[in-house]
Amino acid sequence: MRTTRDRIRHAISFEIIGLAIFTPLASFVFGIPVEHVGVVGVVSATIATGWNYVYNLGFDHLMQKFYGSTRKTVALRVAHAALFELGLLMVLLPFIAWYLGVTIWHALVMDIAFALFYLVYAFFFNLAYDRIFPLPEWQKKAEA
């Protein structure tokens, strides 16, 4: 299982890279000034960073308990990313509506678009992260 230091590196790098891609893209797509998207992005990233750490720790503990490993199949990666984004969506919706002064419906549409972006991003980021920083336990199982 990943160490606390590794989990912190994962969460912070995920959010920094995500913000660098998300902020200008969302500003362009929704026609919102980049500074407003930037505030929503930074607040969302701050909340998401904490959620990322807690969620991934819990997910890995459940995987270890039920599967005896933290190695994820494609199906588990899809479930992992989708459940993460669903939890985040529920927390961020009221903030987005309030800060941008839009209706809950408009905020929901925007939040779903953000979640879809991050769903795809999370899948590929985590795939790359696991390849760049593999766990020793995965190597042992591959050799067996």
Image: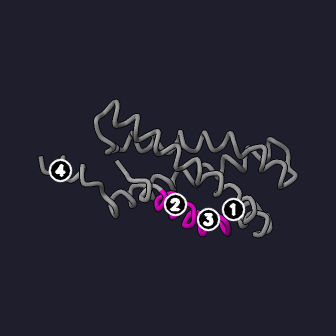
Pick whichever of labels 1 and 3 is earlier in the sequence: 3
Identified by mark 1, the residue type is Val
Identified by mark 3, the residue type is Leu
Residue 45 point in image, percent of width and height: 64, 57
Residues rendered magenta in the picture: 8-25
Q: CA distance from mark 3 to mark 2?
A: 9 Å
Identified by mark 2, the residue type is Phe
Nearer to me, 116 or 63? 63
**SS category of the residue bearing label 1:** helix
Residue under label 3: 19
**SS category of the residue bearing label 3:** helix
Pick whichever of labels 3 and 2 is earlier in the sequence: 2
Residue 144 point in image, percent of width and height: 12, 46
Q: CA distance from mark 1 to mark 2?
A: 13 Å
Residue 141 point in image, percent of width and height: 18, 46
> Does 131 appear in magenta?
no
The picture quadrant where one finds residue 33 is: bottom right
Nearer to me, 140 or 128? 140
Would you call the spot at circle 3 few (<14 residues within 10 Å), some (14-19), or many (20 or more)? Answer: some
Residue at point 51%, 57% (across, down): 11
Eyeballing the image, is 43 above or below 56?
A: below
Residue under label 2: 14
Nearer to me, 66 or 79? 66
Pick whichever of labels 1 and 2 is earlier in the sequence: 2
Q: CA distance from mark 1 to mark 3?
A: 8 Å
Residue under label 4: 140
Nearer to me, 141 or 116? 141
Residue 22 point in image, percent of width and height: 63, 63
Pick whichever of labels 4 and 1 is earlier in the sequence: 1
